[in-house]
Image (cartoon, rainbow, N blue to C red):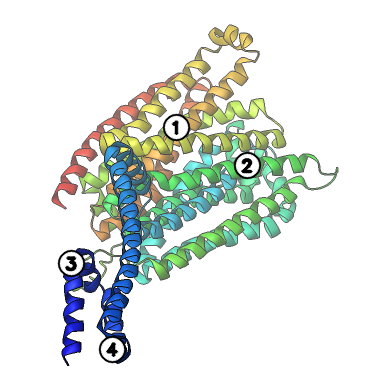
Amino acid sequence: MFIRIMQATASIVMLMLCPFTQGFVTSPIGRVNMGLQMTLSNHHHQVDGFGFKRNQIASSISAAKRNMLQKQQKNKRKNMIARKMSDAAITDPGEEEEKKGIFGKFKAAIPPANERKKLIPLALMFFCILFNYTILRDTKDVLMITAPKSGAEVIPFIKTYLNLPTAIGFAAVYAKLCDKMEHKNVFYACTLPFLAFFTIFALIIYPNSSWLHPHAFVDHVAQILPAGFAAPLAIVRNWSFAMFYVMAEMWGSVVTSLLFWGFANEVTTVDEAKKYYPLFGMGANVALIFSGQYVKWVSKMRASLAPGVDAWGVSLKYLMGAVITSGTVLLATYTWMQKNVVGKDVPAVEGKKAAPKKKKAKMGLRESAKFLMNSPYIRDLATLVISYGMCINIVEVSWKSKLKQAFPNPNDYSAFMGNFSSTMGTVTLFMMLIGRTIFQRFGWRVAALVTPSMIGLTGLGFFALTIFAPTFAPLAAALGTTPLMLAVIIGAAQNILSKSSKYSLFDPCKEMAYIPLDQDSKTKGKAAIDVVGNPMGKSGGALIQQVLIFAVGSLAAATPYLAVILSVLIFSWYRSVNSLASQFDKAMAVE
C-alpha cells in the first residue's frame, strides 16, 4: 500500500513540476495516455520497484510532450494563414463590394421565378401572334392589290364596307360568348375559326378561285356603271381575296388586341405590367424579323418555279402552313398557362377567403356602347385607338399607292414587304428597350405621347415629299435614285417608326390603362374599343380618302387636304392622352 501511495505521489509531483503536462492531462489524448500509464504502473510495481516506474512515466510524458509541440506548431501555422486571409479581405473592401454590386445588379435584372413563369409564356404567345400577323399582313396586300383588275384604291373600300361591319358583328358575338361561356374557352372559340379559314383558303378556295370569282358578270356590270365604280367592282370580282383581307385584318384586332392583352391583364399585376409589358413585344419583334425573312424566302422560291406552275398557290401553302403551325404553338402555350399559372399565383392576404364570384351582368351591344360612352375614361381611351387607326391609314394607303408604282411585279412587291417586316422587327426591338426606360423614368403620360409625335412628324414629312416632289428631284438624283423611290423609302421609314412606337409604347400604354377598371368594363370595354374602335379608325380614314378622291379627282390631288386632317387628328390625340393620363393617375392612387 505504501509503495502505491508513493508511486501516485511521484506522478503528481512530476506533473506539477512540468506546466506542459497540465494541458496534456486535460486533453482527451492526455487522459487516455495517463490512464494507460497508471494501469501499467499498477500491473508492474511488484517487479521493478518505484524507481523504474518513475522513469517509465517520465519517458511517456516526454513523448507526449513532443507530440503536442508538433500539434501546436501546426495550429499556429493554420492561425497565421487564417489571419492573412482575414487581413486581405479587410484591406480591400472596395473590390468585394464591387463584385457584390455587379452580381446584385445582374441578379436583380432577372425576374423572380413566379414572374418568369408568366413572362416567358406570354412572350411566346405574342411571338406566335405577331409572326402570323406579319405573314397575313404581307400576303393580304400582295394578294388583293395584284389581283385581276384591282389595285391599292380598293383598300379604303374594303376597310369601310367590309372591315367595319365585320368588326361590329364580331363584337356582338363576342359579348354573347362572354356571357354564355367560361372566359378561358372564349379564347379557343375565337382563335380556332381563324386557323380553320386560312387552312381552307390555301387548300380549297384559292385553287378553285378561277370559277368561284364572277369575272364575266362583273365585266358585264362594269360596262354599265361609271368608271368610278372600278374599285367596288374589283372587290366583288375577287370576293374570296377580299374575305382573306378582312380575316387577316381581324386577326390583328381580335387575337392580338382583344384576346392576348385581355389574358395578359388577367395574370399580371400593375407593377409587373410596368416592368414587363414593353418587353412582351421583344419576342414578338424577333418574330417580325423571322417572318419577314420567311416571306422573302417564299417570294424568291416563287420566282424560281417552272413556267406554268401556280406560283401563288404554292406560296400560299407554305405561308399558311407556317400560320397554322404558329397558331398551334399559341394554343398549346395558352393551355399550359391555364393549367399552371391562372389561379395558382394570385397574391392574397394569408387567411383571407376568396371573394365569391359575381354573376356576370348581361348587356347587349347597344347597352354596352351606351355604358362605355358615358364613361370619360373609356371615351378618351377609344379616342386614342380611333386616332391611331385614322392617322396610320391616311398615310399608309398613300404610301402603298407609291409602292405599287415602284414594284408592279408581285414577287418584287412581296420581297420588298419581307425586308420591310424584318427591318420593322429590328427597329421595334430597339424601341422596346428604350420603351422600358421611358416608362420607368417619365411615366405613362410621356410614353403615351411618343406615338402621336412620331406619326405626326414622319407623316407630315412624307406628305411634304409627295406634295413638293419636283423640289426634291435634285436631292433624289444626288442620292442616285428617283423621286418615286425616295418617296417609297421615306414612306417605309414613316411606317416602320410609327408602328414600332405603337408596338413598344402605344399598345403597352393602352393595356395598362385597362388595369384599374372593373372586370365588366375590361371585358366589354376592350371588345368595343379594340374590335370596333380600331376598324372604325381605319374605316374613318378610308372614308375621308374616298370623299376627297371623289371631290378632287385623285389621291395625289387630295394629299394637301390629308396633311391638314392628319394635323387635326394629332392635336385631338394629344388632348385625349393628357386627359386619360390624369384619370389613370387618380385611379391608380385610389387602388
Report the Cα–Cα distance between label 4 and label 1. Answer: 108 Å
Going from N to C along the chain, the mark reached first, 4 or 3, is: 3
Q: Position of residue 577 (x, y in %)?
A: 27, 36
Q: Looking at the picture, which amino acid does disc 2 mark?
A: Met
Residue depicted at x 47% and y 42%:
160
Numbered disc in front, either 1 or 3? 3
Q: Name the residue under label 3.
A: 17
Mark linked to residue 144: 2
| Disc 4 secondary structure class | helix
Q: How crowded is mark 2: few (under 14 residues within 10 Å), some or many (20 or more)?
A: many
Q: Looking at the picture, which amino acid does disc 4 mark?
A: His
Q: Nearer the viewer, residue 96 or 52?
A: 52
Numbered disc in front, either 2 or 1? 1
Mark 2 vs 3: CB contact within 8 A: no
Name above or below for residue 285 compared with residue 409: below
Residue depicted at x 78% and y 48%:
310
Q: Mark 1 points at which residue?
A: 498
Mark linked to residue 200: none
Q: Looking at the picture, which amino acid does disc 1 mark?
A: Ser
| Disc 3 secondary structure class | helix
Left or right of residue 205: residue 394: left
